[in-house]
Amino acid sequence: MRWQSQAGECQLYLDVDCSRVTYNTQPSPAVLQAVRSLQQQQQQTGQAIVGRTESYQESLSSSLLSQLNPNTTTEDQLTEAYCRDVDALSSEFERQVAQGAPTPPSRGSAGQSSSKPRACAEVPSSACAVAYDSGDCGGGWVLPIAEGEQRFKFFSSFYTYRNDIDTVGVRAGCILTAFEDSSFNGDQVTVRAGSTDRWVVLAETPGYEHMSEQIESVKCRCDN
């Protein structure tokens, strides 16, 4: 375990160097066989998750690691399979590092909202919205949310935020829709911000209470 300062908690740390595995690296025979086995399995069973939340078993079933023989796999092959698994999440890791913790933007008072809990920072000007781990922003993690879609799936870099959002701040001119399931389905709420940022403490806001610590995916867009 290692302390993850952005999330404000200890997390499982895997000391794996993936710098040697790139798109141009020739896959090993064992990994190629794992890919073929996984494709065959998906064709036979189907992987579509419609109208419900993806379970951790279903998330893990799409991993190359699940197709390797533990009795014959070498350490190099295991590392390669792991690195090719997490490569699908590399853009999210980069975005998370680039965004970092939110800092007060220089928008002036016109973009600020009086509904903001005192301890919360202003919504970053580079973000569509921001989510907090607590109702008063007094502790825990903070997550800047970019325009587009975000799923808090099992075995992803965003699993920390799954079913753990208490407060959201939406930048002026933006709209955030939050869903109770990880495939943008199930119950949902929408937070629209007009000419000022809008803040919602879910557990304390009528019509939003049922979504407190129940959010598994979000969509956010801005009109300006």
Image (spheres, grey):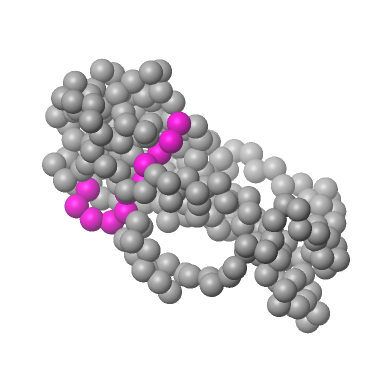
Q: Quadrant of the N terminus?
A: bottom left
Q: Position of residue 99 (x, y in %)?
A: 39, 44
Any magenta on residue 200? no
Residue at the location (42% across, 56% down)? Answer: 160
Residue 127 visible here: yes
Q: Position of residue 138 (x, y in %)?
A: 19, 52
Left or right of 31 on screen, residue 100 = left
Residue at the location (32% across, 54% down)? Answer: 141
> Which secondary structure dominates the residues rendered in magenta?
loop
Q: Position of residue 117 (x, y in %)?
A: 17, 40
User: Is residue 49 positioned above or below 2 on the image?
Assistant: above
User: Is residue 222 positioned above or below 33 on the image?
Assistant: above
- Quarter of the image for residue 173 reads top left
Left or right of 189 on screen, residue 66 = right
- Quarter of the image for residue 31 reads bottom right
Residue at the location (86% across, 66% down)? Answer: 29
Q: Nearer the viewer, residue 107 or 209?
A: 107
Q: Quadrant of the C terminus?
A: top left
> In the rendered structure, which segment of residues is drawn in magenta?
137-147
